[in-house]
Image (cartoon, grey):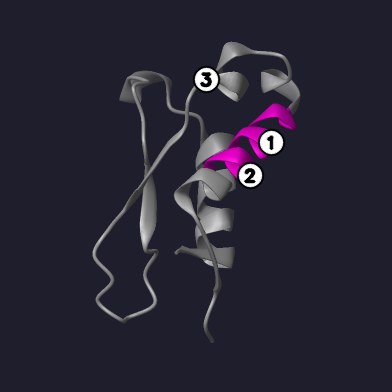
Amino acid sequence: MSRATRTAADLAVMLRERFAGLPELSGSTLATQSVCVVGVEDDGDGDPTWTVRSSVPSSVWRLDVARVIKQLQLEYDLE
């Protein structure tokens, strides 16, 4: 089944909104900082067509943030 498409700017806005909705991130700088959505090669196998570049060190990655990104990847392809 094909996913709906959105621009990188639209996806970034959607991510920021969802990050701001996470209880521990509400009002934090992470929720409002720049989100960089970048395309990845689409090999036609249903994998996500975009990812998020992060300047956050991997030692502080959050599972809830990763879930938000994955959920949007399952819902939308990059236009």
- Which amino acid does the dot numbered 1 rest on? Glu
Give the structural element (helix, strand or loop) at label 2: helix
What amino acid type should be assigned to the residue bearing mark 2? Met
Residue pointed to by mark 1: 17
Give left or right: position of 74 versus 43: right
**Disc 1 + disc 2, Cβ < 8 Å:** yes
Q: Residue, x 36% and y 29% (percent of image)?
A: 54
Give the mark nearer the N terminus: 3 vs 1.
Answer: 1
* Residue, disc 3: 33
Specify the segment rendered in magenta: 12-22
Does 19 lie within the magenta span? Answer: yes
Compared with 60, 72 (above or below) is below
Whole-percent x, y for residue 12 in the image: 53, 41
Q: Please identify the quarter of the rendering in which residue 49 is found.
A: bottom left
Tell me if residue 15 is in the magenta stretch.
yes
User: Residue 14 got which mark?
Assistant: 2
- Residue 61 place in picture, x, y as percent: 43, 27
| Type of amino acid at the residue the image marks with label 3 | Gln
